[in-house]
Image (cartoon, rainbow, N blue to C red):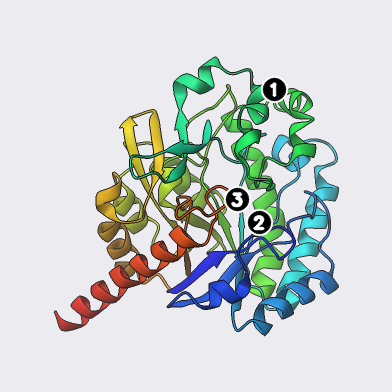
Amino acid sequence: MEMTLRWYGAKFDTVTLKQIRQIPGVTGVISTLYDAAPGEVWSPERIRALKKEIESAGLNLSGIESVNIHDAIKTGAPERDQYIENYIETLENLGKEEIRLVCYNFMPVFDWTRTELARVRPDGSTVLAYTQEAVDALDPEKMFESIAGDTNGTVMPGWEPERMANVKQLFELYQNVDEEALFANLKYFLDKIMPVCDKYDINMAIHPDDPAWSVFGLPRIIINKENILRMMKMTDNPHNGVTFCSGSYGTNLENDLPDMIRSLKGRIHFAHVRNLKFVTPDNFEEAAHLSSDGSFDMYEIMKALYEIGFTGPIRPDHGRMIWNEVAMPGYGLYDRALGASYLNGLWEAIEKAARRS
């Protein structure tokens, strides 16, 4: 296991590589070309520059999150083959730089959905939060407007203003796409890219839908054990794998997180380990990584990852805003640093207990 932090690049992130390097046990970052548009080919020069910048700070570029997928691929539009060719070229360029992990998602319109970016908790920290009641009362075209005031001047992933400006047109693109069509389009994409993944040993790690149910009537498919196992089987290649995000799968309390981890042995290439606190089953907020601060047993999640022999990157996720930090909501330094230290401590304890038994 390698402990990492997500880093959006010097132009977009308030957290510096120097600060990340000082977190005990964190040896790498998961990064991206944050200003690259979906469907754009990533040039070798930009990839090389990103890798050099990170390695010069004493860290590994442990993976990419994300190479975003163009909506033409998700909807199965006639022009999808050109965008798939562009994606393959990007994977070629990443592979030549020995980058072996790509996290991506197949969510229509919204990459993730929260109704609050700064819910105040009893301790005074602020967190991302979701209520179905708020979603049901919202016009989806006004979704971005409802949270834009709490972004702290940052650009939120999946909620880029230029994308949200076209949200009506995006909904129109998906009006004839149901779950079965989305599965078919995902299979088409995966089957096309597996040869380049095999060539360069690139692990594709799909991120689950967040929350794990339909929002605004849009189809969602990466939501539970049944569907993710279906995906593994339909393109049965070890490079077709999963980003196991406890906070995304965990939005549905019927998902048994440790059981899901064990059912995906050999196919989890990347893990986001975070905690949620539920008020009701459809009203939840991000919590500290400490188990007792939320609703998840973080020990059991980490133990399951250890027991399946997981060796990939892990990162803490969606930290609270604490100690007066002003940063991209969910992606400040302080609480994620605490989370990384806590998760590393759990892993060390689990590893030592296993060796002594």
In the image: residue 57, left or right of residue 173? left
The residue beneath circle 2 is 66
Three-letter code, disc 2: Ser
Q: Earlier in the sequence, mark 2 or mark 3?
A: 2
In the image: residue 87, left or right of residue 348? right
The residue beneath circle 1 is 141
Pointers 2 and 3 in contact (CB under 8 A)? no
The C terminus appears in which quarter of the rendering?
A: bottom left
Q: Residue 251, image x and y in percent? A: 40, 38
Q: Distance between the residues labelled 1 and 3?
A: 22 Å
Q: Can residue 238 be seen in this view?
A: yes
Q: Earlier in the sequence, mark 2 or mark 1?
A: 2
Residue shown at 69% from the left, 46% from the top? 153
Q: Residue 53, image x and y in percent? A: 72, 77
Q: Local crowd at mark 2 within 10 Å, few (<14), some, or many (≥20)?
A: many
Provide the secondary structure element on which disc 2 rests: loop
Q: Residue 91, image x and y in percent? A: 73, 65
The N terminus appears in which quarter of the rendering?
A: bottom left
Q: Is residue 212 visible?
A: no
Q: Residue 141, image x and y in percent? A: 69, 22
Q: Nearer the viewer, mark 2 or mark 3?
A: 3
Q: How far apart are marks 2 and 1 (CA)?
A: 24 Å
In the image: residue 251, left or right of residue 346? right
Q: Local crowd at mark 1 within 10 Å, few (<14), some, or many (≥20)?
A: some
Three-letter code, disc 1: Glu
Provide the secondary structure element on which disc 3 rests: loop
The residue beneath circle 3 is 328
Q: How far apart are marks 2 and 3 (CA)?
A: 17 Å
